[in-house]
Amino acid sequence: MTTSTLPDYREQSPEVAARFERLQQRPVTLEVRDLTKRFATPKGSVTALENVSFRVHQREFTCVIGPSGCGKSTLVRILAGLETASSGEVLVGGEPVSGPGPDRGMVFQGYTLFPWLTVKENVMFGPKMAGTPDFAAEREARQWIEMVGLSKFENAYPHQLSGGMKQRVAIARALANQPRVLFMDEPFGALDAQTRCQMQEYLLEIWKNVDITVVFITHDLDEAVFLADRILVLDPNPGRVREFVEVPVPRPRAPSQLFEPPFMAIRKHVDGLIHPPGSEKKEAPVVRLAAPDPDVV
Ligand SMILES: Nc1ncnc2c1ncn2[C@@H]1O[C@H](COP(=O)(O)OP(=O)(O)OP(=O)(O)O)[C@@H](O)[C@H]1O
Ligand SMILES: [Mg+2]
């Protein structure tokens, strides 16, 4: 694995380069050492991840990207302690991970709120389970609900909310346990494009206001570049680290940057890693139900 730099971006943007230098000086919050995961299947062993190693620093925003089946969800499930590794080690704050813990929060793509609880009760759930008295859990829940901009909906039930609102509650619920690291597995994957963009901006705003290290899985290259400090690019079969790329797009990020040279350059670079020359789309089998038409190609 290498930590790549884009061609001479450090000279072009000394401020961005200085920020990366400072990030590198921060304590390591998450360390993954030589992680390998094999699944036993009826057809034999499948190696989902092989010798994956990387480090994430405190309050860094990392995106993980790679083709479908390259092991992104497996990786994040192991990091969250929901799955065990075949070999290797995961450390959070220097402590080995051996199962789920309150130091790690998780937000999935599917809506995972308890449908029979209100927004406030959903957010209070974790702290109450951890033994926080009701009045304190309620006070804390209100603070997190305010942070995700849903104070007016604290007594609503999940079915009364839009998809984007549900995911904001899911974020508030994860943050209410005060984790050090927030793992997000394609959390905005089911949202329409416009809501997705709004959610990305919300998430950056929340990240700005909370001491949290984020590991965010996505299929979407634009989303990764918009959100991340660094992008961990995984290769498939078996899942291996291709590169851990710095995103030299200045912060604060804004959608208008999507068409600016630094954004385009890093996007092109990561796209080249995911789709290396020679990996062009394979011909899909064709079932022809209409006669060939030279104007419909
Ligand atoms: N419980 C399981 N048993 C057997 N194989 C599994 C299991 N979970 C995952 N795999 C295999 O491990 C590999 C990685 O799967 P994973 O779900 O982590 O990929 P992914 O990168 O998250 O894919 P996607 O982008 O489609 O969500 C795949 O080959 C998958 O079939
Ligand atoms: Mg997945």
Image (cartoon, rainbow, N blue to C red):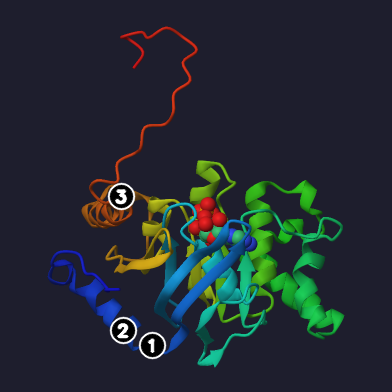
- Of the residues shown, which amino acid type is indicated by label 3? His
Give me the C-alpha separation between circle 2 and circle 1.
7 Å
Q: Quadrant of ligand 1?
A: bottom right
Give me the C-alpha separation between circle 2 and circle 3.
31 Å
- Of the residues shown, which amino acid type is indicated by label 1? Arg
Q: Which residue is mark 1?
A: 26
Near mark 1 (Cα within 10 A), the count class, few <14, some 14-19 or many ≥20, is: few
SS category of the residue bearing label 1: loop
Decide which of tag 2 and tag 3 comes sooner along the chain.
2
Q: Is residue 82 above or below residue 186?
A: below
Q: Which residue is mark 2?
A: 22
Where does the image place residue 125, in percent across and percent down from the top left?
Answer: 80, 72
Q: Residue at x 62, y 69 (%)?
A: 106
Foreground label between 1 and 3: 3
Residue situated in front as seen by the camera: 187 or 155: 187
Circles 2 and 1: CB distance less than 8 Å? Answer: yes
Where does the image place residue 172, in percent across and percent down from the top left?
Answer: 66, 67
Q: Residue at x 12, y 71 (%)?
A: 11
Residue situated in front as seen by the camera: 1 or 107: 1
Q: Quadrant of residue 4?
A: bottom left
Quarter of the image with the C terminus is: top left
